[in-house]
Amino acid sequence: MSGRRIADSGRIDRDRPVDFTFDGRNYSGFAGDTLASALLANGVSLFGRSFKYHRPRGVLTAGIDEPNALVTVLRGAKREPNIPATQLEIYNGLVTESQNRFPSLGFDIGAVNQLGAPLFSAGFYYKTFMGPVIGPLKGTRFWMLCEWFIRRAAGLGRADYEPDTSPYGRMNAFCDVLIVGSGPSGLTAARAAADAGKRVILSELDPVTGGSANWSGETIGGKPSADWAAEETAALAAMPNVRLLTRTHVWGYYDGNTLAALERVGDHLSAPQPGAPRHRHWVIRAGTVVLTTGAFERPIVFPGNDRPGVMLAAAAQRYAAEFGVLPGRRIAIFTNNDSAYHAAAHLSAAGAEIAAIIDTRLTISNGARELAQKAGGELMLGHAVGGTSGSRAISGISVRQVDARGTVSGEATSISADCLAVSGGWSPAIHLASQAGHAPKWDEDLQAFLPPNATQNWIGAGAFVGAATTAEALRGGRNAGLKAAGAMASRAQQAKVDAPELDPHPAPIFEIRATDGKSGKAFVDHQLDVTAEDVRLAHREGFMSVEHLKRYTTLGMATDQGKTSNVPGLAIMAAARGIAIPDAGTTRFRPPFAPVSLGALAAERFGEVKPDRLTPMHDWHVEHGAIMMPAGLWHRPQIYGLSGETLEQAYVREAKAVRQSVGMVDVSTLGKIAVQGPDAAEFLDRVYTNKFSTLPVNKARYGLMLREDGLLLDDGTTWRLGETEFLMTTTTAAAGKVMQHLECLLDVRWPDLNVALTSVSDEWAGTAISGPNARKVLETAVKGTAVDNESLPFMGIVRGEIGGAPVMICRLSFSGELAYEVYCGAGHGTHVWEALLAAGEPFNTLPYGMEALGTLRIEKGHVTGAEIDGRVTARDLYLDWMLSKKKPFVGSAMMDREGLAAEDRIRLVGIVSLDGQPLGGGAHIVESSGREEPRKSIGHITAVCYSPALSKYIGLALVNGGKARHGQRAFTADPLRKRYGPVEIVSHHFFDPDGSRMHG
Amino acid sequence: MIITCPYCGPRDVVEFTYQGDATAVRPDQTSTDQDAWNRYVYDRANPAGKHSEVWQHSGGCRAHLVVERDTLTHAIGVVRFAREKTAKAKAARPAAPAKKAPARKPATKTGARRRAGK
């Protein structure tokens, strides 16, 4: 093949030459060229080596469907592999490399693979590397040995290992009508919808709009079609309700008419524009989608059909018309339909010599005949190309007679040609429709799959729905645009199209075969080197379903997703099975329609979209040396460490201070739900396992909540503030879950209950003050109420003032000490906290953090989320005394099921480290000692600490049998942290089991 | 997926939380019929096609909605407040003795709907 530039043709800008390199050689093209067109213009025909056999490959197409001419683009140290040269716009300084060749594209060692070709047939891996070891050359171990070589020899381009530092963007867009594809039908649809005042987005994957109008050579409305398209585009661009997206491919059709698109913003520029992303990921919500995605031309499968210089007919026409490049000097045409005659005439007019037009059909339309005459060259009807010759590029073809089934026979005629333009008919680009529709429909006349019935709100027009002519496309586009806009059809004049009258129906021929069988490889999937013979081999070996065919041969599974190979592959399988093509089935197309950069999908996602929740006293904690730790969304003080202190030293000091005198902890993070209304008490009776209707006003009660399935949901205290008003507290982590649980019950199950729920977690600041001197601190700090044992008994509530701020105080204890929770409005949080601290100064009141809080509760044997992990029952935690027998509650019917009441469940115990070493949360408890066989787990540790009260490392655990094991010895096994050691199983009430301290 | 909340209008699905099968019937609070409870907690019809589901507009008005959704296409049909539906169902159904719920085969879609009083 010897391509060359022709004068004054195409949309390239001849005043702007562009320099670039391919495989280290400098070339020059023009602005507007793709790498493919520029290299063709420079006489390059060899673009790459094939995947498996390392055969020389050229350019097959002129668009996104390209399977052969894949290159790697280098920008500095960045390598981006597998870019179709047909999609890559050249820019000054563009550096590209061919792929899958060593040492060079011209001389490739891997081409020896062709000699061993019978070895590499479909199923090569399965046959060679799987199954039992027989001799030295089979099995998985053999695979391990060969993998390195195979991975090097086979494959596509090589990516780099550098992080991708390119900027990527993301955009959410909304429109009434989204039009995908800007060919004649897309442009008219956009115009119709835009004229009706709708918000329109028109997307086009190429850099310029117009689609086939840019190269068809027809006239629309008396103007060359390319000019018509440019004028229509300019008119649309001037409308404020229209957005044009070029270099954008819509690749995914998701529910709710949500579509995903990728805009290649900066790939065609030498240097990225400041502030602009490289790619932009669009999420487009469209009222109606108009699919005008056109059609892909199909190749015909014949021996030697992969030789560089074999090209689709419309692609050859496109190179001449759009880029001013003739792909050959002497071009042969091979077709089974009329559309290639168009290409022949066009190429001839552009200066190429038409060597011959070879048509498999015996009769053709008058329009085609006229075009053939215009084109010149011998018209060979009832013939087919049975082979090609040439080393690195095509130099000649051999033509023989062909029957209606594609079998060639008779004498071969040799014809010299440096380019073979092939057309096997057209396949509508139904990819997006397939994502938003049922199975595609086979059309016998067009020999193609037409778009399916829609499951979403889209309309099709143009070649996408099988329109045969531009006039039909314009009409269909206009109607689709009007329908999408909800506008009435008008009698507006349609632009007149001047085009030859052709027969749109191809002959049903997909493959050319010789009866003697000695004809060389005929490729179906060029990118993965799948031949027609591979498809038949799959059939012989039983992989007949289209899904099996794909996986066994890898047909259609490359980066081009079989845009040129799916239908021929299916047709060959159908022929082998002796059934009709639609009976052989078709695969549905999944997103993406074409490759999408991962960077774009990840664009502008910065961490998690979650708030940081800070308590009202947060700044105070930070200023006073607290180390903050996450607790769900909240930030809570872990310790208030002194310099030089370890974590353990700090929390032990804090916990000791509480037991000895008094300490304060910020409990503002507890979930707080206002439960109000005439039926509030009844509601609480239903959701808690124990009764709340009997709770007197100004008293609090500890409550347990179960899920519907009888497992524990959460625990907490609920305060009765009035006859019809309660304040429920939940654990910090479960606040949202509990709120949702309660709302669901009220809304869905018991709408008859008159109860209102309000989350008030953020309205109240809470401080727990605990220790033997807690009451003395309160007595100093609180005005307006007495806090002695009589006025404020255990679980009592009083209201007063601290530092002038109104407070509500409830006497309850999580630490096992005499303790109070002081609540005030969130805005007074720090003020009250500081006032309490000042009042506590004589008693050396210390603020304490989560570690000390945990230590105190473990010593006391109180449970939290660590134990209530969604798998335990109230019995498991020895809380069955809280399960009322007098009333039903959520979970009461399900909690007594056999499995939940079984004796061998894991139940709450305390454990003590016997070797004086710390325990690890999550470690298993095993019966047999240690390291050798730490297998049979009898439970696991849920929480650990060093207990200053006991001067031991202790923990809580859930252990098989629970109480029955008190006093037994067991072992902790923690292989990940390599911690093994003896423990004693004891009661979880380590400290002050009778509660005399907190009741005192 | 866009769900049209009767209070807030059409909103993206990210604002909603799935809260289960709307055809599941909670036995009367006092019922001790283990089969009925088992059906309510565990048995689901898993239809391919139209399904009635509870969604909470958790990122909005927090109302629970009964949403008709096609599990094949994600098409959203009628959306109502769960509160209204249940209230209507209760009002429309003659008060039946709660204890009389006989053990039935796992709920079919239509069966469950009928029991929901739809």
Image: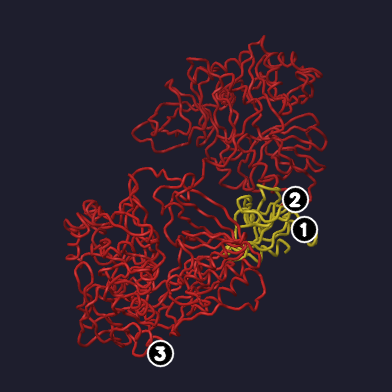
Chain colours: A red, B yellow
- How far across and how far down the image is residue A388, in percent? 23, 75
Residue that badge 3 annotates: A366
The mark nearer the N terminus, 3 or 2, is 3
Look at the image and tell me in which quarter the N terminus of chain A lies.
Answer: bottom left
Res. A715 visible in picture: yes
Of all chains, the one bearing label 3 is: A
What kind of residue is marked 2?
Trp
Location of residue B72 by image quarter: bottom right
Alpha carbon separation for disc pair 1 and 3 = 84 Å
Q: Which mark is residue B3?
A: none
Vertical comparison of A439 with A673: above or below: below
Mark 2, secondary structure of its residue: loop
What kind of residue is marked 1?
Pro
Q: Which residue is drawn at 64% across and 42% down?
A: A706
Residue that badge 2 annotates: A750
Q: Is residue A802 or residue A237 the one in the foreground?
A: A237
Q: Residue at x 57, y 53 (%)?
A: A172
Look at discs 3 and 2 and give the one toward the viewer: 3
Residue that badge 1 annotates: B97
What kind of residue is marked 3?
Asn
Mark 3, secondary structure of its residue: helix
Q: Residue at x 65, y 22 (%)?
A: A995
Mark 1, secondary structure of its residue: loop
Alpha carbon separation for disc pair 1 and 2 = 18 Å
